[in-house]
Image (cartoon, rainbow, N blue to C red):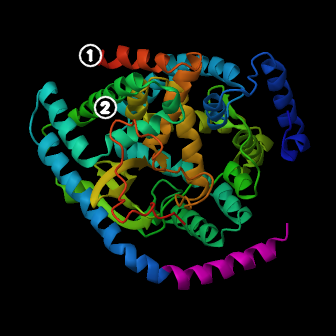
Amino acid sequence: MNRRRFILACAALLAFAGTVALPSAGRADARSDAAAKFVQDLGARAIDVLVKPQLARDESMRRFRVLLNEGFDVPYISRFVLGPNWRTATQQQQQEYGTLFERLIVQVYADRFAQYSGKNLDVNETLKITGSRPEGDTDSIVNSQIIRPDAPPVAVDWRIRTRDGKQKVIDVAVEGVSMSVTQRSEFSSVIQRGGGQIEALLDTLRQRVGSAG
Amino acid sequence: MKLPGFFRSRGAAAAIALSLSAITVSGCVLPPRDDPAALAAYKEANDPLEGFNRAIFGFNEGTDILLFRPAAEIYRTVLPNPVRNGIRNFLRNLRSPLDIANNLLQGDLAGAEVATKRFLINTTAGVGGVMDIAADNGLPYRSEDLGQTLAVWGVPEGPFLMLPLLGPSNFRDAAGVAGEAYGDPINLWATNTDRDEIPVVRGIVGGIDTRSGLIEPIDDLRRNSLDYYASLRSLYRQNRISEINNGQVPAGSESYPEFPEFPEDDAAPAPAPVDNSNGTAKSSKP
């Protein structure tokens, strides 16, 4: 491979991209700005509703579920996480899976928030928005840092999709690791090891979170 | 199995690879041909040696629960935070020659400059590297290793590999780890002057220090995963892609996850309503 030619081509591409990208980035900035504010507000609400008060487990799970559905497109995420297996599932399986998936998320994250329960955190000192950019036609990526005492900050990127003028988070990436992609990989492994049957995943989920009745 | 040229040129690495493939002939999983979902899963997992890897993983889990996690917890309890930071800074500073070399090999002159400045500042003003003065002055640490360099050169990652004691890796990164172990100037000096214990102590302390910073995340992952091995495999791969790109995963690249709409699924629990008020089809994406 001719490296010099490659570098030259890259440089030319960069210069070109610089002149072209600016006006279009300006047009879409309103969307990504709004997305940044959306994430900031969501963080503030999470701290007010979930972290500051001392809550019983049931109550914190109830509150988290409300917040989750306000801020996140849970049906989209659950569909994404099932990947190609969605199409082979029956409608009944899809429905049960959707319920179980939401329950799993609520249980896991309500417990994670419980570790911080009763702490008087300030959103501006905990969640620092470091940037945002439009992505594709409908999405924005909001970059943020979670500041922790006595530990290095964690880079968290939020992918926000705007649909019918409403914003919802569709993915969260922690230090470059997408939660949706990780979960998809995990679910797919459970299904493959269960002989390619989605029922294997449903069984595992039922055992974990209780039946979806 | 086709191995990258790097492997063939290294006797020891080639021997390891050969013995690995000998062990795993029986555990090798062939790609499924008839089922598209299974094929997609096979490709995403990138783990034809899964049977072998899961066996190593079982061994690693045992040693971690019995040995490394307790050791990491004692380390964290006994040593106060400033002392642990000092140890971490010192070990990072020892890696400086490798960091500088890898930056240069990747053609990242700015990165090499930062790594060199860090080395000079922290070795002198930082008292032999114990204090990270450079990071406080706008020169943060960024890890560069031979695996990342090989990736920048276009060496494919190869199949996923669970290394005994060292944990998740792949063929490319395992070659990187082996190469660095041979090429590290501190280790070379230690071996040549009959101080063989230095690389060993360095490795153990570094391992326990890293593990002590991951006690809660790993506990969380173990507790909440439906398939901990599969989670770890995906985490490792994504994290490496992020490191190779220095945290800036370029959009549109193959490694960047796509988040398509699912218009074909009208039976979805909450189908995304497409704005069709003009009677026209949804605008095509670039």
Can I make out residue B244 in this image?
A: yes
Q: Which residue is mark 1?
A: A213
Marks 1 and 2 share the same chain: yes
Q: Report the Cα–Cα distance between label 1 and label 2.
A: 14 Å
Q: Is residue B23 left or right of residue A132?
A: right
Amino acid type at image mark 1 = Gly
- Disc number at residue A59? none
Q: Is residue A7 magenta?
A: yes
Q: Dot 1 falls on which chain?
A: A
Q: Secondary structure beneath disc 1? A: loop
Depth order, front residue of A185/B177: A185
Depth order, front residue of B271/B100: B271
At x 20% / y 43%, what residue is drawn?
A67
Name the mark nearer the viewer: 1 or 2. Answer: 1
Q: Is residue B203 left or right of residue A73?
A: right
| Classed neighbour count for the residue bearing mark 2: other residues with Cα under 10 Å, few (<14), some (14–19), many (≥20) | some
Q: Dot 2 falls on which chain?
A: A
Give how far across and how far down residue B230 sits, in percent: 54, 28
Q: Which residues are magenta?
A: A1-21
Q: Which residue is mark 2?
A: A102
